[in-house]
Image: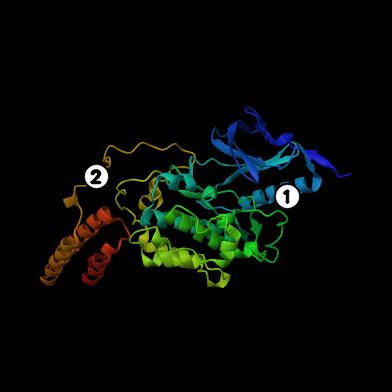
């Protein structure tokens, strides 16, 4: 006779105190691997997330299924405990509530990337900020010997503080020869899974990078690269089809960003770029330190950690109101935007100033021109290329 176990202990009602420290307020979310509750840390007074395993099936389930679920959950706690990175929630505490393990983590006030994209169309500065944050978090995971394996827009949080966090390490695994273990249950998100997962092959750091390529594609096109359509499954498309170039969904897309996205989606693991390649490609599109607030501002503003890193608030802090000095968005009149002829004439004026020996005036002219161009077109727009070239040539930086 197969032994069974109950799962009632994973239901935490408001008022429950877990670990003699965390008082549950309400359920915050549920996924395939765990159930998350909002709770108050009675030691610090801060809000935290308490996560317990999500036990599948009926009220009674087989002992081996229970053990697999608990084992995955314990591995998640082990993975998170070893990671210390600003784009990954910190473990406040972990232990057992009765016989069931729990993890208490930093509470992130914000929204999932999927919800952020539903109301925002990120420009290339926002794409670079999000991509850089996630890539750096993945690099930290890989340095710590951990594969995430389920990077997707529901496992990325955009904090109200502008920081992007990688969450849900429920199916993370140690890197190495055993990186195909614990796959008895087919887990993960099909639309964002690498081909090697469907082939049941060994997964590596570049498997996480395929996930990242799918996320980039989603940010650009508002959809993953492959969607099961009834005629051909999502699995078959990941294995056999080339994605539609994202430039078909986006106007004036920089070629290097499209090449990076498609490179990350290469079927062959060895053909995908390294994380350092990702960061190098995104860097020119990041907003500069001290750059003005984007216009219009997308909320949350993911450029804050790069424009004004010293102002980043703790993840659990509520969003602050915008300062009085910040003007509300108003559509610019047509003449407020820079024209190509104005860019050309201003560069010519700076060249003349430089030629006459007034290098300081030339530098001011070009710096002001670049500022206006960023305000008009955004960081990374090709219209800045001629300005950047002039600044380099005339020593205007």
Q: Is residue 176 left or right of residue 136?
A: right
Residue 169 pos. (x, y %): 61, 51
Q: Farthest front residue?
A: 231
Q: Farthest top residue?
A: 15
Q: Crowding near pointer 1: few (<14 within 10 Å), some, many (20+)?
A: some
Residue 160 pos. (x, y %): 44, 42
Q: In the rendered structure, which disc, 2 or 1, sits on the residue that comes first in sequence? A: 1
User: Closest to the observer: 183 or 370?
Assistant: 183
Q: Tally the numbered discs.
A: 2
Name the residue carrying label 2: 331
Query: CB under 8 Å between callouts 2 and 1?
Result: no
Residue 239 at least partly seen: yes
Residue 83 pos. (x, y %): 58, 53
Name the quadrant of the C terminus.
bottom left
- 68 relative to 243, above or below: above
Q: Is residue 322 left or right of residue 5?
A: left
User: Closest to the observer: 200 or 277?
Assistant: 200
Q: Secondary structure at mark 1?
A: helix
User: Closest to the observer: 221 or 76?
Assistant: 221
- 381 relative to 119, above or below: below
Q: Secondary structure at mark 2?
A: loop
Name the residue carrying label 1: 71
Q: Farthest left residue?
A: 356
Residue 42 at least partly seen: no
Q: Is residue 363 left or right of residue 43?
A: left
Closest to the camera, between mark 2 and mark 1, is 2
Residue 186 pos. (x, y %): 68, 55
Q: Is residue 375 left or right of residue 205?
A: left
Mark pair 2, 1: CA separation = 54 Å
Q: Which mark is residue 38?
A: none
Name the quadrant of the N terminus.
top right
Q: Crowding near pointer 2: few (<14 within 10 Å), some, many (20+)?
A: few
């Amino acid at each position: 006779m197969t032994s069974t176990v109950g799962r009632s202990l994973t239901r935490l009602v408001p008022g429950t105190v877990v670990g003699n420290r965390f008082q549950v307020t309400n359920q915050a979310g549920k996924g395939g691997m765990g159930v998350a509750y909002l709770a108050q840390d009675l030691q610090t007074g801060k809000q935290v997330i308490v996560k317990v395993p999500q036990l599948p099936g009926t009220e009674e389930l087989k002992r081996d299924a229970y053990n697999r679920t608990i084992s995955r959950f314990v591995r998640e706690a082990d993975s998170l405990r070893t990671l210390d990175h600003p784009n990954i929630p910190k473990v406040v505490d972990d232990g057992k509530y009765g016989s069931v393990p729990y993890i208490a983590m930093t509470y992130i006030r914000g929204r999932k990337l999927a919800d952020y994209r539903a109301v925002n169309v990120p420009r290339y500065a926002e794409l670079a900020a999000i991509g850089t944050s996630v890539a750096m978090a993945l690099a930290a995971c890989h340095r710590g010997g951990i594969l995430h394996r389920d990077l997707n827009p529901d496992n990325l949080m955009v904090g109200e503080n502008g920081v992007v966090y990688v969450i849900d390490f429920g199916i993370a695994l140690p890197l190495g020869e055993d990186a195909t273990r614990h796959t008895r249950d087919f887990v993960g998100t099909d639309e964002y899974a690498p081909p090697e997962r469907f082939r049941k092959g060994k997964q590596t750091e570049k498997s996480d990078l395929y996930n990242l390529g799918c996320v980039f594609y989603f940010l650009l096109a508002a959809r993953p690269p492959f969607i099961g359509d009834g005629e051909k499954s999502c699995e078959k498309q990941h294995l056999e089809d080339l994605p539609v170039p994202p430039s078909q969904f986006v106007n004036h897309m920089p070629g290097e960003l499209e090449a990076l996205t498609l490179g990350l989606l290469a079927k062959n693991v060895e053909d995908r770029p390294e994380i350092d390649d990702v960061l190098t490609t995104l860097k020119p599109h990041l907003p500069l330190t001290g750059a003005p607030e984007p216009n219009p501002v997308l909320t949350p503003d993911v450029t804050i950690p790069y424009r004004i890193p010293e102002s980043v608030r703790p993840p659990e802090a509520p969003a602050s109101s915008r300062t009085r000095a910040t003007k509300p968005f108003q559509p610019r009149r047509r003449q407020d935007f820079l024209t190509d002829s104005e860019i050309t004439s201003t560069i010519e004026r700076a060249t003349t100033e430089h030629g006459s020996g007034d290098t300081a005036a030339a530098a001011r002219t070009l710096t002001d021109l670049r500022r206006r161009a960023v305000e008009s077109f955004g960081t990374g727009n090709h219209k800045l290329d001629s300005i950047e070239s002039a600044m380099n040539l005339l020593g205007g930086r």
